[in-house]
Image (cartoon, rainbow, N blue to C red):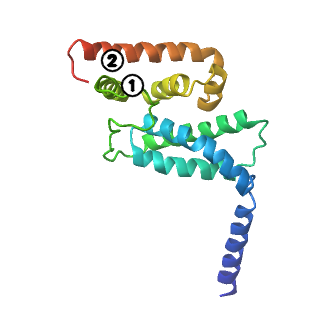
Amino acid sequence: MSEWLLTDVERLSALDDADRTFQMTEEAFRAFYDVTSRPLWSYLARVTGDRRVADDLLQETFYRFLRTTTAFADDDHRRNYLFRIATNLAHDQRRRPRVTAVPLDEADPALPATAAGADNAARRIDLNRAMAHLKPRERSLLWLAYVHGWSHQEIAAALGVKTASLKMLLFRARQRLLAVIGESDAGEKL
């Protein structure tokens, strides 16, 4: 019986240690979350293609970020590390058995705001369909480069690739997207 109680005490002690690993104050975390949560969610939604999965991964990403003991040089390093965690979680999610995904709808708030109109809505729908045909890494590259406007160094740090190979990877992703869009224009169904 005493052995069982000792185990519970050890568990409670371990929980106390877990709470002490958070590296940010609540105010600092709120400010960081306000700046990064929406872009991170849109990235996860685009990479996974499922809003519910993006919600779950967003929570897990911030939880793991808070638990890290890494010392950050600046806000860019902190943001890149956050996106790196999210990218790894998205890769892990793809390895799990598939469940039916809820497709992104036409009124995707993750897309940048543009002039309203039927033509723009049709382009967004076409882009959503074309992006769905790309590999997850290609979607990640294009999304970070053209939606978030990140530099090659920032993308390389977030995705864990070498900066020297990023130009070629980004070029190939653009070519693949153009090919998918070209197939669509030729009358083939996306």
Q: How many marks?
A: 2
Residue 116, image quadrant = top left
Residue 114 position, x and y percent, is: 43, 27
Q: Which mark is residue 183?
A: none
Circle 1 sits on which residue? 134
Residue 54 position, x and y percent, is: 46, 45
Left or right of 82, for residue 145: left
Mark 2 lies on a secondary structure that is: helix
Mark 1 Cα-neighbour bin, 10 Å: few <14, some 14–19, many ≥20: some
Residue at (44, 32) in percent of width and height: 111
In which quadrant of the rendered image does the N terminus lie? bottom right
Circle 2 sits on which residue? 180
Q: Is residue 124 above or below residue 75?
A: above
Mark 2 Cα-neighbour bin, 10 Å: few <14, some 14–19, many ≥20: many
Residue 101 position, x and y percent, is: 33, 44
Residue at (62, 20) in percent of width and height: 152
Q: Is residue 40 above or below residue 6?
A: above
Residue 124, image quadrant = top left
Residue at (48, 51) in percent of width and height: 56
Residue 164 position, x and y percent, is: 64, 15
Mark 1 lies on a secondary structure that is: loop
Left or right of 169, for residue 121: left
**Circles 2 and 1: CB distance less than 8 Å?**
yes
